[in-house]
Image (spheres, rainbow, N blue to C red):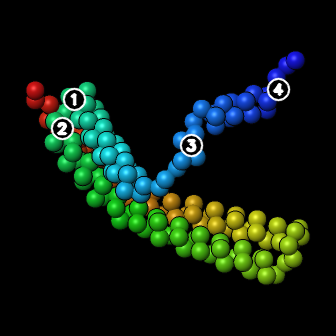
Amino acid sequence: MTVGRFDRIFLIAFAILVTCPAVFAFTANPECVQDARQDFNLCVSNCREAFKAQKDCCRNIDHDCAEGCRDGFETCVEVPMETLADCRSECNDALADAKENCRIAYAFGTAERDRCIDQAQVVAFSCRDQCRENVRGALIQCRTAFRACIKSCPAATE
């Protein structure tokens, strides 16, 4: 007798349920979950910082200088990224309105409604694409300034 794929899945699930009754003894502990999330975020932050320091070491550049460059980059991209987010939000709002108008104008499941919504999605895509193009120059300037800053950093001292 051969055991099918679904039979194997059922057997595994059954074995887990039989051997792990604690699965059903779930009690919510939001404080514990929040503590775990904070520990995780701290761990990620520490790892990210260690990665940056090691990367700077590999490049043989002063870590403090590189951090200053990174801070400058973050400040530089702040306004273009906010502009991008606002623009995209406007595109998405217009899409939602257009889709609603399509739903009002055409019956459910009709080809006309599908074409109307498809066209609204094409317009929204073009709108979001234009948003990206609008901030592209500013982001390129930020990247160029960041690279120049990193190149100007002194060698790492040990």
Q: Do the numbered discs 2 and 4 sit on residues whose CB atoms are within 8 Å?
A: no
Percent x, y of residue 127: 59, 67
Q: Residues under labels 2 and 4: Cα distance?
A: 57 Å
Q: Residues under labels 2 and 3: Cα distance?
A: 47 Å
Q: Do the numbered discs 1 and 2 sit on residues whose CB atoms are within 8 Å?
A: yes
Tag 3: residue type?
A: Val
Q: Residues under labels 1 and 4: Cα distance?
A: 54 Å
Q: Please, what secondary structure does the residue beneath circle 4 have?
A: loop
The residue mark sitting in front, 3 or 1, is: 3
Q: Residue at x 41, y 62 (%)?
A: 81
Q: Residues under labels 3 and 1: Cα distance?
A: 46 Å
The residue mark sitting in front, 2 or 4, is: 4
The residue mark sitting in front, 1 or 4, is: 4
- The residue where tag 1 is placed is 57
Give the quarter of the figure containing the C terminus: top left
Q: Is residue 154 left or right of residue 11?
A: left
Percent x, y of residue 144: 33, 47
- The residue where tag 2 is placed is 63
Tag 1: residue type?
A: Cys
Precedes in sequence: disc 3 or disc 1? 3
- The residue where tag 3 is placed is 23
